[in-house]
Amino acid sequence: MPETVVLDASRATTISQILVEVVSASNRLTRVAARRTGNTESPALLRTLSTLIASGPMRIGELAVESRVAQPTMTKLVRTLGEREWVRRIADTADARAWQIAITKKGERALDEWRDSMGAALLPVFADLSDDEADVLARAAAILHARIAGEIGTAASVTDTAATASSVVEEGAAR
């Protein structure tokens, strides 16, 4: 169980305001990235693949809850992903009557391609960052991923993201 930390009111307000700004900027950045890539793919499909990468195989109901959509909506999304061979059904080891949805290698490649295209599309917006600014973004990304992983119970993506962010910063410093 996570440790409870008591903050004074002023610090709590400050952190709360910063987090609201991070969420707002993240939402705007997502929209800018989508527009700049020209990708017409449904964001819900790509979010579903991201969820499966981060959390591993899940039942459709669990996937719907995690994605904040109704179960019939998730069933439709999974059907579309299955038709593209981006996900597959696997037996649920905890219940032989149930199935879980797992991402396939083809789905992983599709998600990687989408993420790469987002990075390339956003690069012109951030190409002039100083090394210090790039360091701050890399550290912020690592902190956010670590905290989010604690909420959803996965550490795998944190390690990958922190390593990637670190290598990006090192490459920037090498320039």
Image (cartoon, rainbow, N blue to C red):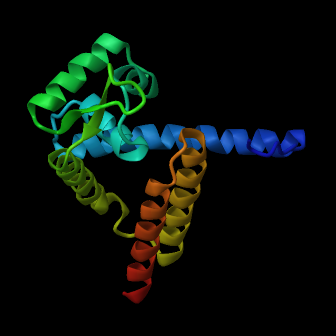
- Front-lying residue, 55 or 119: 55
Give how far across and how far down residue 146 sits, in percent. 57, 54
Q: Position of residue 37 (x, y in %)?
A: 19, 47
Residue 123 spot, x, y in % from top left: 30, 62
Residue at the image point whose x is 36% and y is 87% from the top: 175
Residue 81, quarter of picture? top left
The N terminus - image quarter: top right
Residue at 17% in and 47% down: 110
Picture quadrant of residue 124: bottom left
* Left or right: 119 in relation to 155: left
Where residue 32 sits, quadrant-wise, is top left
In this view, 17 is above or below 94? below
Closer-to-camera residue (36/8): 8
Choose between 85 and 131: the one closer to the eye.
85
User: Position of 77 compared to 54: left or right?
Assistant: left
Task: Please determine whether, in this image, residue 166 is positioned above or below residue 57.
Answer: below
Q: Residue furthest front?
A: 96
Above or below, 144 against 174 in this view is above
Residue at 22% x, 30% y is 42
Count of number-bearing discs: 0
Question: x, y percentage for residue 136?
Answer: 55, 66
In the rendered image of this protein, does residue 102 appear above or below residue 111?
above
Nearest the eye: 146 or 136: 146
